[in-house]
Amino acid sequence: MDKVKVTDTNVIEQILNSLPTATNEKKGLLSSDNKIMGGLFLNAASTHSIHPNDYYLYTREGIMIGMLTLISFSIGNKYYSLEIGRTMAFITIGMLELIHSFNIKSDKSILEVGIMENKYLIGSFLLGVFVQNIVAIIPTFADIFELHTLNSTQWIITIIISFMPIPIMELQKLANKDKIIKRNIHNLNYKKGETI
């Protein structure tokens, strides 16, 4: 089976061509007029029913996942090899998304909500972990994705990094709890016609 080689410029072109335009026709995603992060992101308040301040939170979560993936790659690349770094990054990004799904199901702490409440989420998580690990462990699939076998230390590092969103987001939720309460009080007072 021939392996497809993709150049960085080809990937960037594909990503840029697949991006939708913003709902405001005058302001595209990459427009400096777009007020969210200098034009890199859609104005979420106009496309979804979320508060504009929450969009920054979601952007930070994406940056967190990207940074943790880069940390995993850097550790693998520095201490082992480029191929091990790529494999660790591949496994980490998949696991990060699966584990982070528990964080984003509620603004409340995981400890308050509980993780066993949604059986479909648990099933999807287990299926995702199974498929992710099958791709990394079975040589036929690993060759297709150009992955290499990890030793136990590399797996432990990858798993620890993959679980990092839980404590990070728990701290974020704790810090944001007061901000959310204050914003809700402000919105209620604003609807009543009062000024603060």
Image: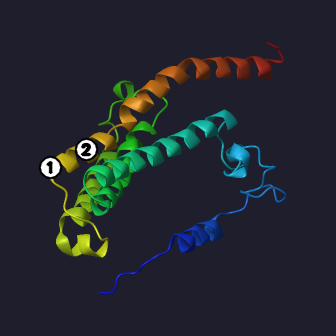
> As drawn, is 174 to the left or to the right of 28?
left
Q: Work out which residue is located at the far left of the displayed protein and give it.
A: 152
Residue 66, x across and y down, in percent: 47, 48
Task: First in sequence, mark 2 or 1: give its number.
Answer: 1
Q: In percent of the image, x 68 and y 17: which residue is there?
A: 185
Q: In percent of the image, x 67 and y 46: which residue is there?
A: 44
Q: In which quarter of the view is residue 116 placed? A: top left
Circle on res. 32: none
* Vertical side of 58 occupied by 130: above or below: below
> As drawn, is 130 to the left or to the right of 64?
left
Q: Secondary structure at mark 1?
A: helix
Residue 78, x across and y down, in percent: 31, 51
Please name the amino acid that badge 1 sits on.
Ser
Q: Are marks 2 and 1 in contact (CB under 8 Å)?
A: no
Q: In which quarter of the view is residue 144 placed? A: bottom left
Q: Work out which residue is located at the far bottom of the displayed protein and give it.
A: 1
Q: In percent of the image, x 71 and y 47: which residue is there?
A: 43
Question: Pointer 2: what residue?
Answer: 157
Q: In percent of the image, x 34 and y 25: which residue is there?
A: 111
* Vertical side of 175 occupied by 64: above or below: below
Crowding near pointer 1: few (<14 within 10 Å), some, many (20+)? few
Crowding near pointer 2: few (<14 within 10 Å), some, many (20+)? some
Question: Pointer 1: what residue?
Answer: 152
Compute the Cα span from label 2 to label 1: 9 Å
- Name the foreground residue: 75 vs 165: 75
- Name the foreground residue: 24 vs 1: 1
Quarter of the image with the N terminus in it: bottom left
